[in-house]
Amino acid sequence: MLALALAGAASADEPAKWLERMNHALTTLNYDGTLAHWQGGKVEMLRIIHRVENGIVSERLVSLDGSGREFIRTGSRLACYLPDKHVVLVERTPVKASLLGGFPVVDAQTMRFYDIKDVGHMRFNRRNTRLITVMPRDQYRYGYRLWIDDSTAMPLKTQLCDSHGKVIEQIVFTSLKIRRHIPDSAFQPGISTAGFRWLRNDSPPNRQKVNPNGTVWRVGRLPPGFHMTVRAAQDMPGEPGPVDHLVFTDGLASVSVFVETHAERTPPGRAPVTESAHVGSSYAFSTVVDGHKVTAVGEVPPETVRFIADSVKAEKTSDAAPPPASLGPLPGGPFAHSPPPPN
Amino acid sequence: MNEELDSQLSAMFDNELPAGECELLARRLSRDADLMARWGRYAVIGAVIRAERGVTLDGSVAGRVSAALSKEPELREDAARVSGGEPQLRWWHPLAGAGLAAGVAAASILWLRSQALPGGSQGVTPAMVASTSIAAQSGPPGASATGPDSFVVPPPAPRRPMMVVPAMELADYVVAHSAFSWPVTRGNLLSALMVSEPGTSSTPARSDQPAPGVQGNAIQNPK
């Protein structure tokens, strides 16, 4: 009997369970906190307010360091206020992919590609926390160190690490309040948008048909452990037509592939150009396939987004049924243990 | 006036400044370089003392903190080997040696205050976790829990000249992608997008080694 009780306690302390608790806390609690975001030698202060009320998620992220940028999510609508660019970007995100649910499950498959450990109890910021490390087994993904609060399961400190354990990004809650109720007024922008340019995508994602011209975009080879979970057509602000959106994940890291469905033929005689870009520690890589711009974006190393973007190919469909346009997980997906293309 | 501002800054860090005043102060910060420097000291010390390395600080305080940290061994994954159960104490010793402990303690930058959740519980119970709606995912064929069969380490990405360009399209993609990210990485992603100007580099593809599946000679320049 005692052994059973001990076994149960040990099971509850499994690191994966802590990650699940943390996921649940991040997405279901009402909280108001200040974050210190460190990346590339710079520290920026942000305020985050998160509320779940009547099943609707509201979230506001405010830069406190001068840019005045704000992101405000209400349900499936996300507005990005970028005063430094005099732009407001409004996007409607898939409901199923909103902050409630839709995030990866840490399972045996995940364990194949990450070494997840419960390092033990740590005192952090005068709180009892559990340090969970999630270290990648290869260089296709990042690792994490998470200081998870014992009582609330909120990650008080998060470190993003490369495959060698070097910290490349860090977020620390400098203050955090768990709230019973947060008023609507907390989710109003604090800036005037007079004279701003609004880029809107308020239409719901196209779930019915991915590509009207019978072209299906697939990824021939993927880094180990990644598989496709979402295929959708998404309208993007400023784009004349919907963009094919494919999502690949290894259980924790995810990569989106966007394919512009309208082909743009460039004048002959110009050299092909690829683009790489970064946002913090996340990377994007763009290339051109059959005249369509293909962009892979994800919180993964640059090699991974390039590998995936370079593996995208178009397949013409016959008069068969259209490809799945699900916003939820797909059964299986392309998978191969193949080396990346030579550089 | 300075005392009043200090008081406001302190209150801001203590989360005792009303939201309206907080945002007004943030706007003032954006216009006042001296105030920004003071804010930076408040903000960064707390972060620095807990493991960040390479944080840029100005002034003598920054120098002393950085000097103290530079002598510290890197916090590694195997922190479990650190005896005593509270490895974070390692960070406090050099700070005390630099004479900063009192100041850091007085600043009380980092603290967390939890209020009771509805129902009187602050915890997240296993039952709550079990009831979470999480999208199931199917693994690839042949997946097992025994570890990866083999991996190929990709070669390092070639160094490319970085060229910062307006990248609304990239921002849009990042926002769209964030909806599908793990909550932890989504926070990082949106925070990074908020505080940084995306950098973009454009590199002509090598004609002798076309990437698989890439055809044609079309050019897509940064928008």
Image (spheres, rainbow, N blue to C red):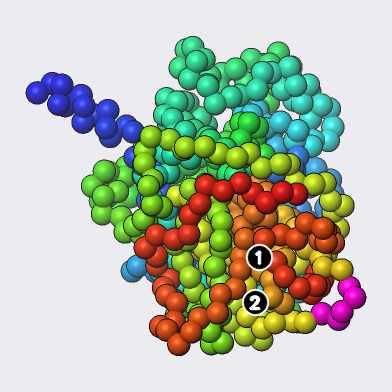
Q: In the image, what residue occupies the spot 86% across and 81% down? A: A267
> How much space separates mark 2 and mark 1, taking CA atoms?
16 Å
Q: Residues within 10 Å of mark 1 (few under 14, many from 20)?
A: some
Chain ID of residue with mark 2: A
Region in magenta: A266-270
Looking at the image, residue A239 lies above or below residue B221: below
Residue A266: tell me if it is visible: yes
Chief secondary structure of the magenta portion = loop
Q: Tag 1's secondary structure?
A: loop
What label sits on residue A150 in the rendered view? none
Q: Amino acid at mark 1?
A: Gly
Q: Tag 2's secondary structure?
A: strand
The furthest residue to the right: A269
Q: Is residue A87 left or right of residue A94?
A: right
Q: In the image, what residue occupies the spot 75% across and 21% down? A: B70
Near-viewer residue (B45 or A28): A28
Q: Amino acid at mark 2?
A: Glu
Place of residue A302 in the rendered image (x, y in percent of width and height, measured from the top left): 69, 50
Disc 1: which residue: B213
Looking at the image, residue A213 lies above or below residue B66: below
Please check the rendered image and state whether residue A144 is part of the magenta-colored stretch, yes or no: no
Count the numbered circles shown.
2
Place of residue A128 in the rendered image (x, y in percent of width and height, measured from the top left): 42, 30
Q: Quadrant of residue A266?
A: bottom right
Q: In the image, what residue occupies the spot 26% across and 43% down? A: B126
Near-viewer residue (B106 or A313): A313
Disc 2: which residue: A260
Q: Is residue A237 left or right of residue B158?
A: left
